[in-house]
Image: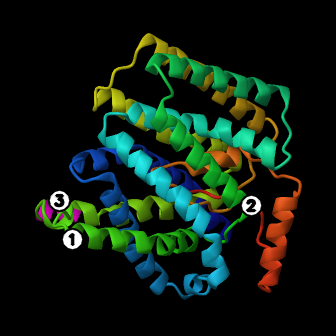
């Protein structure tokens, strides 16, 4: 019976993961309906209502309350919180200014930049296939720069913030996606409350100016952030690492289709050439990862990312040798009197 239940749970992991990934890919639709709200205020709402929902979840789960940690855990959450905030606000801006294609491009590029960061900072190995994948990704980015007449700012900023967030969470791993995201919202709460106070004092708070329906939509920023995160955290221990790595491309693919079919953004031949090079690079990198890992392996739960798919890093940030930086992290954890957490890639939002 236990084996049957375990098999049933594993089967439920795939639809849960697919729903979470599609959910993140469709998030530009939500921001588009609130495009009259400024990006900083939308960020403040996402932080505030996510904090409220996560606090309620943790309040009803004693096991989660025991993982809240002390001041050092919150100190470690500061840098991820800054990177997550930057990623969220750029994603919101891209969604409401007709640049959903750039948002998609940013998350397609993310695994390639994550691989480069792993090579530079974590002493990971660069084989021939990954070198070719990075070269194709770089070539595709150059083509995109030519197509846009300059650097595609939203795509580059999303890629950089998301990849750095993955690197930080690799060096400072966390035990639970829900608790770590809650800590990051706690760190961001002073900004959210301060910005609300500033807007209220100048009578510019959209929450009280745009009617009840808009206010309800803004409040939904919390559940819309937390629900896919919970689905992802549930699914990842039940889905094999290689299969989940390939599934991560669902999010930018959904956003790509949304930009073309719903927002009617223009895709030129040069744009498509750039995407083609990047997709070829992703295919090579995925193949290089899949052929090195057994299909039956599974990974621990990861964390969200603002606006959508930080777990793409799982595919390309392989287990690394300890570096001086990670050794320092080990000493920091031991100084708290707790065992060193299992080193793994985490997931973060969009």
* Residue at the (26%, 62%) spot, across then down: 218
Residue 195 lies, with reference to residue 317, above or below; the image says below
N-term-proximal mark, 3 vs 2: 2
| Sequence-first disc among 1 and 2 | 2
Q: Tell me: 342 left or right of 91.
A: right
* Residue at 24% across, 66% down: 199
Q: Earlier in the sequence, mark 3 or mark 1?
A: 1
Q: Secondary structure at mark 2?
A: helix
Q: CA distance from mark 3 to mark 2?
A: 39 Å
**Which mark lies nearer to you, 3 or 1?**
1
In the displayed orientation, state which residue is furthest to the left.
211
The reply to whether residue 234 is visible in this rendering is: no
Which one is nearer the viewer's eye here, 115 or 152? 152
Seen at 86% across and 39% down, the residue is 125
- Rate crowding at label 2 as few (under 14), some (14 to 19) or many (20 or more) other CA atoms within 10 Å: many
* Quarter where residue 50 is shown: bottom left
Q: Secondary structure at mark 1?
A: helix
Question: Quick check: 242 left or right of 177?
Answer: right
The residue where tag 3 is placed is 214
Dot 3 alpha-carbon crowd within 10 angstroms: few under 14, some 14 to 19, many 20 or more: some
**What residue is drawn where x is 57% and y is 48%?**
162
Tell me the magenta residue range: 212-216
Q: Magenta region's main secondary structure?
A: helix
- Relative vertical location of residue 42 with respect to residue 104 in this rendering, above or below: below
Judging by the rendered image, the residue that carries numbered circle 2 is 171
What x and y, as percent, mark residue 6? 64, 65
> Would you place residue 50 above or below residue 124 in this image?
below
């Amino acid at each position: 019976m236990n084996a049957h239940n375990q098999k049933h749970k594993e089967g439920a992991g795939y639809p849960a993961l697919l729903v979470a990934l599609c959910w993140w890919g469709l998030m530009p639709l939500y921001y588009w309906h609130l495009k009259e709200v400024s990006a900083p205020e939308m960020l403040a709402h996402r932080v505030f209502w996510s904090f409220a929902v996560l606090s309620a979840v943790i309040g009803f789960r004693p096991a989660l309350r025991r993982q809240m940690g002390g001041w050092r855990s919150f100190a470690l959450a500061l840098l991820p919180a800054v990177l997550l905030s930057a990623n969220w606000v750029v994603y919101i801006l891209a969604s409401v200014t007709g640049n959903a294609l750039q948002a998609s491009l940013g998350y397609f590029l993310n695994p390639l930049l994550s691989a480069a960061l792993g090579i530079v900072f974590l002493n990971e190995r660069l084989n021939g296939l990954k070198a070719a994948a990075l070269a194709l990704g770089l070539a595709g980015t150059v083509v995109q720069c030519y197509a846009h007449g300059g650097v595609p700012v939203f795509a580059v900023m999303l890629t950089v913030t998301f990849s750095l967030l993955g690197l930080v969470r690799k060096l400072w791993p966390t035990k639970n996606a829900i608790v770590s995201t809650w800590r990051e919202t706690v760190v961001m709460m002073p900004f959210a409350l301060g910005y609300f106070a500033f807007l209220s004092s100048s009578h510019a708070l959209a929450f009280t100016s745009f009617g009840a329906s808009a206010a309800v939509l803004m409040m939904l920023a919390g559940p819309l952030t937390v629900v896919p995160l919970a689905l992802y955290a549930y699914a990842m221990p039940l889905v094999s690492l290689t299969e989940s790595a390939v599934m991560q491309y669902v999010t930018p693919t959904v956003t790509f289709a949304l930009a073309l079919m719903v927002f009617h953004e223009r895709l030129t031949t040069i744009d498509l050439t750039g995407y083609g090079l990047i997709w070829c690079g992703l295919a090579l990198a995925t193949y290089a990862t899949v052929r090195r890992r057994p299909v039956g392996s599974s990974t621990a739960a990861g964390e969200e990312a603002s606006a959508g798919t930080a777990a793409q890093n799982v595919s390309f940030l392989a287990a690394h040798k300890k570096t001086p930086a990670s050794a320092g992290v080990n000493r920091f954890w031991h100084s708290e009197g707790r065992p060193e957490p299992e080193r793994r890639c985490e997931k973060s939002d969009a």
